[in-house]
Structures are given as structure tokens and as C-alpha cells.
Amino acid sequence: MKLAFIIDPIAKLDPTHDTSVALMEAACGQGHEVFITSKESLSIVNGKAQAFLEPVHIYPVALINEKWQAQTPWYKKELGSYQLLENMQVVWMRPDPPVTVEYIYATYILDYVDPNRTLVVNSPKGIRSANEKVYALQFSCTPETIVSSSKAIIREFVQAKGEAVIKPLDGKGGEGILFATTSDRNLNSIIEVSTKFGRVPVMIQEYLPAAQAGDKRIILLNGEPIGAVNRIPSSGEFRGNMAAGGSVAQIKISDRELDICRELCPILQRDGLIFVGIDVIGGYLTEVNVTSPTGIREIDRLDHTRLAEQVINWLNLQTSKLKL
């Protein structure tokens, strides 16, 4: 199997944390051919999508004293060339958000990959339709939420709830998330800054006190949960994101969360969202992450699993049905 990963510059990735590295490592470990490229190198020539693909080999990390350790260097690149993406069995779209106009243009190019020959993960159309904040609102398991750029509407919501969380629609890793209360004399300024003075809509979600006990990341493969990790806010912080300094802890998937996954499953499958990370707080779905969901390294470390290998095995089975 040949797999191409569209990623951020590989030298900036963390082999002990990034899920993209875990997936590439698992593919290399199973003897598959792995290539890397960037969204900037994507092109359409003669009606077909192509990219500058560099072969790469990822050396495996080792779990030592309950911490992942990577060797130096942890990858080896070879000379690349322009190739048709339909020569790959799998193309992964995994640059980090924000989903800029350049990101959207990349998904348009990926529309020109022949789906009969190549599986694109996640579906370009699915990524475009699934804003990681707004997409969750179609499901019944979300907390009370609004999306608006209106100061009056946002203030009314915060006043009704007493406490709320304001999230940019294009953020990642907890960046730009603000805690709003009616007693905060900076509330008007918070709304103005977050909405860029009423020009940009944001998500406003009722604050869930259960967030202090953790924000659970659940990884779904083709709509089925395969693992979870609890992200716990650091002292004085309300965000549990690992990028915001949250710690991680082992945790099981509850019956309530299995019900949430069952509700999402047919919609994710319909939209071609194969590899997804959902965020759940206190039994409520808060986000559906479809661009570059992470968490595999943390889950594997805590549960002693091999989720990336499970994902690659699933892809190998699916691509065996494609035309060669």
C-alpha cells in the first residue's frame, strides 16, 4: 500500500505526540510505502491531482518509563518527485487548522483524485462541510449553544447562562477560547475582540462545570470509537487542551458516550469523515475534529494499545477493494 500524507513541515512535528507521525510510523512498520507533501505543492494537471511526494521512513518511538522516546534523527527523507495522487492507495489530509482559504483550495484540488483508485482521508467535501465547531450542532447531544457576531445576542446568551465559553470557529488546541461571565466588566471588550468588532461569528456555549474534571477526546474510525483520553485543565485554567497545558489521564468510554458515537456514526460515514476526534464534556458533545485530530500517542501510552496500527490495518482492508 502507498500512502501520501499532506502535513505541516515534518521537522516541526513532535514524534512523541503527533498523531500524523504515529500513523506514518505504523504504515512504515507494516512495510507500506509512505510519502509526505504539503498542501502548497498540490496541483491539477490535465484534469488530475498531483503533488511533489517525498518518500519518508519513520523510526519507531519507544516507551521508556511511561514516556515516549524518539531517536535522533527520527525520520529519513529521500529525493521526491511529482506524482499523480491516484498512484497512492491512501491520501491523508492532515495539516493543522486554521482552515484558511488556502486550506479550502487544497480540498478543491483533492476533489480531482479518482475515488475509485484512491481513498482520501478525510473526504475533501466532508472537511469543507464540517466546521469543527458548527458541525456538532446538528446532533442532539450538544450543550446549549449559539453562533453569532452580534454583541447584543451574545450578551443576552451570557446573561441568561451566567457563564459561557466563546470559541473562534477556526481555532485549534484551545487557542482563542475565552471564558465569559456577566460579572466581568470586560465582557463587552471580550465580545468585540472575539468577533473582530461584529465582523466574524463565534460560537458561544454554556459553560459546563464538568470541564474541571476533564475534556474527553474520543477517536472514531469510520464512526466507531477505538480509544479515548481525558484532558484535565491545569491549575487556574478552564481549557483541558494538551496544547493549552492540560494533563492527560486514562479513562474509559461511558455508555452515554457510546450513545453519542452511535448518533454520529451514520452522519460521519455519509460525509466521508473516516478519522475523527470528538470532544465530550460531562456527557455533552462539544466539538467534532476532522482536520488533524490527535490523541493516539497519549491513548497508546496510557492504555498500551496500538491504535495507529489498527487504523492502517483498516485502510489496508478498504483499499484492497479499489481499482489498481
Image (spheres, rainbow, N blue to C red):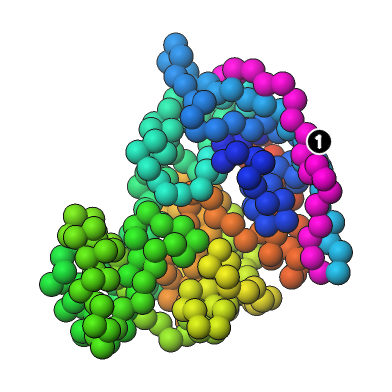
Per the image, the residue denoted by label 1 is: 31
- Magenta run includes residue 19: no
Residues rendered magenta in the picture: 66-84
Report the residue at 44% width, 11% height from top: 46
- In the image, residue 273 above or below residue 248: above
Report the residue at 81% width, 69% height from top: 66
Amino acid carrying mark 1 in the image? Gly
State which quadrant residue 298 falls in: bottom right
Residue 124 seen in the current view? yes
Q: Give x and y (percent) for residue 232.
A: 57, 78
- In the image, residue 46 above or below residue 311: above
Q: Give x and y (percent) for residue 31.
A: 81, 36
- In the image, residue 89 above or below residue 67: above
Report the residue at 74% width, 30% height from top: 77
Q: Is residue 219 left or right of residue 108?
A: right
- Magenta run includes residue 79: yes
Q: Quadrant of the C terminus?
A: top right
Between 254 and 72, the one lying in front of the other is: 72
Q: Give x and y (percent) for residue 67.
A: 79, 65
Between 126 and 67, the one lying in front of the other is: 67
Could you tell me which secondary element the residue under label 1 belongs to?
Answer: loop
Which residue occupies the extreme top position in the image?
Answer: 46
Report the residue at 57% width, 79% height from top: 234
Between 175 and 189, the one lying in front of the other is: 189
State which quadrant residue 4 falls in: top right
